[in-house]
């Protein structure tokens, strides 16, 4: 079972508060990076579900939710990264004449 995230008051951190407000308004998660390294994921929360706690009334995850959580997990900065260059690899494969 996943741990409950720690709470941190950001009311005195204007830049972080602005980003949090942007995420809540757009309902779209935001990946925070330092240079090329991902460091945190800022995601909107349903304040009603947070106030009633996790557990009772929590919806069950579906297979689609599970698959969506792993998207991009294999991405790397290597030049041979298949996820990044898949279209190039496919184009090369289709350009070759059959033997």
Image (cartoon, rainbow, N blue to C red):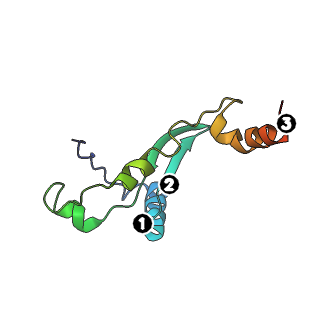
Q: How dense is the environment of label 1, judged by Cα within 10 Å: few (below 14), some, or many (20 and up)?
A: some
The structure residue drawn at horizontal position 46% and vertical position 62%, both measured from the top left corner, is 23
Position of 72 relative to 22 (above/below): above
Labels 2, 3: front one: 3
Is 33 displayed left or right of 97 in the figure? left
Q: How dense is the environment of label 3, judged by Cα within 10 Å: few (below 14), some, or many (20 and up)?
A: few
Mark 1 element type: helix
Q: Earlier in the sequence, mark 2 or mark 3?
A: 2
Q: Nearer the viewer, residue 9 or 32?
A: 32
Horizontal and vertical percent for residue 58?
20, 60
- Residue located beneath label 1 in the image: 24
Horizontal and vertical percent for residue 51?
19, 63
- Residue located beneath label 2 in the image: 30
Is 8 displayed left or right of 36 in the figure? left
**Numbered badge on residue 35:** none
The structure residue drawn at horizontal position 39% and vertical position 55%, both measured from the top left corner, is 64
The structure residue drawn at horizontal position 30% and vertical position 65%, both measured from the top left corner, is 46
Q: Earlier in the sequence, mark 1 or mark 2?
A: 1
Q: Earlier in the sequence, mark 3 or mark 1?
A: 1
The Cα atoms of the two marked residues, 2 and 3, are separated by: 40 Å
Horizontal and vertical percent for residue 97?
86, 36
Q: Examine the image and state in which quarter residue 50 appears.
A: bottom left
Q: Nearer the viewer, residue 99 or 64?
A: 99
Horizontal and vertical percent for residue 52?
16, 63
The Cα atoms of the two marked residues, 1 and 2, are separated by: 10 Å
Q: How dense is the environment of label 2, judged by Cα within 10 Å: few (below 14), some, or many (20 and up)?
A: some
Mark 3 element type: loop
Given the current orientation, which residue lies at the most extreme front position? 99
Q: Quadrant of the C terminus?
A: top right
**Numbered badge on residue 96:** 3
Mark 2 element type: strand
């Amino acid at each position: 079972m996943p741990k409950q995230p720690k709470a941190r008051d950001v009311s005195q951190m204007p830049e972080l508060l602005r980003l949090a407000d942007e995420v809540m308004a757009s309902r779209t998660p935001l990946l925070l990076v330092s240079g090329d390294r991902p460091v945190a994921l800022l995601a909107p929360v349903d304040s009603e579900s947070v106030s009633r706690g996790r557990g009772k009334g929590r919806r069950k995850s579906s297979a689609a939710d599970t698959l969506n959580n792993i998207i991009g997990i294999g991405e790397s900065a290597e030049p041979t990264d298949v996820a990044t260059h898949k279209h190039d690899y496919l184009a090369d494969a289709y350009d070759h004449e059959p033997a």
